[in-house]
Image: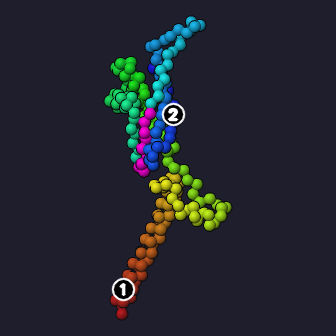
């Protein structure tokens, strides 16, 4: 059995919800047809499925439609499609492909907001005004921006620790000098 899936449509339907429609093409080698020229062709079953993907800060949740829900259930309960009926094998393939699509969407971070940050060369007043308005309720920074912020925090903490060490050394020195008197 050969199966392939493509994303047909993705549309945002809520703050964190994205409706996704996929088409799945399954070639069943067991069902050979003979075309007009007498050559074997493989019958392809093409079906459309949809689900809603909820994108939260640190997790994703998928709510499939009824038909896709059955397929995901078969996929979740069977490690392979071996030993299943032909119909269940097709459902298993649909579940496996859907799982791959969701993982690819998550891994590639296609569902995360994209930001340009501060744009150089613009009008200063306009830049200040734009930076005061959040892009969304839950503004998500890029991974690079988060890493830069963590480096700044790490540097600030290092400076604070050095300053406190210096103060402790100074206090110890003052106590020692006071005890000498």
Q: Is residue 166 above or below residue 34?
A: below
Q: Is residue 154 magenta?
A: no
Q: How busy is the neighbourhood of tag 2: few (under 14 within 10 Å), some, or many (20 plus)? A: some
Q: Is residue 48 above or below residue 54?
A: above
The answer to whether residue 36 is seen in the rendering is: yes
Look at 42% across and 51% down and name the residue there: 57
For the residue pair 63 and 42, the one nearer the viewer reads as 63
The disc placed on residue 139 is none
Relative side of 91 to 12, left or right: left
Magenta stretch, main secondary structure, is strand
Relative side of 181 to 163, left or right: left
Circle nearer the viewer, 2 or 1: 2
Q: Secondary structure at mark 2?
A: strand
Q: How many marks?
A: 2
Q: Is residue 121 above or below residue 1?
A: below
Q: Is residue 83 above or below residue 33?
A: below
Residue underneath mark 1: 175
Rendering coords of residue 99 (x, y %):
42, 34
Q: Distance between the Cα atoms at labels 2 and 1? A: 72 Å
Q: Is residue 51 magenta?
A: yes
Look at 54% across and 50% down and name the residue there: 114
For the residue pair 124 and 83, the one nearer the viewer reads as 124
Q: Quadrant of the C terminus?
A: bottom left
Q: Secondary structure at mark 1?
A: helix
Q: Quadrant of residue 179?
A: bottom left
Q: How busy is the neighbourhood of tag 1: few (under 14 within 10 Å), some, or many (20 plus)? A: few
The disc placed on residue 7 is 2
State the extent of the magenta-drawn residues as a range: 50-58
């Amino acid at each position: 059995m050969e199966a392939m899936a493509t994303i047909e449509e993705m549309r945002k339907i809520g703050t964190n919800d994205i409706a996704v429609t996929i088409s799945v093409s399954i070639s069943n080698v067991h069902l050979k047809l003979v075309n007009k020229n007498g050559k074997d062709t493989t019958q392809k079953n093409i079906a459309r499925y949809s689900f809603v993907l909820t994108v939260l800060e640190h997790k994703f949740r998928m709510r499939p439609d009824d038909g896709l829900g059955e397929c995901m259930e078969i996929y979740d309960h069977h490690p392979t499609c071996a030993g299943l009926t032909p119909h269940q094998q097709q459902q298993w393939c649909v579940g496996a492909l859907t799982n791959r699509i969701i993982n690819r969407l998550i891994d590639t971070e296609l569902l995360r907001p994209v930001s340009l940050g501060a744009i150089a060369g613009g009008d200063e007043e306009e830049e200040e005004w734009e930076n005061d308005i959040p892009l969304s309720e839950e503004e998500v920074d890029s991974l690079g921006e988060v890493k830069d912020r963590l480096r700044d925090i790490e540097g600030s903490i290092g400076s604070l620790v050095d300053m406190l060490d210096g103060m402790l050394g100074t206090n110890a020195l003052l106590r020692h000098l006071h005890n000498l008197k």
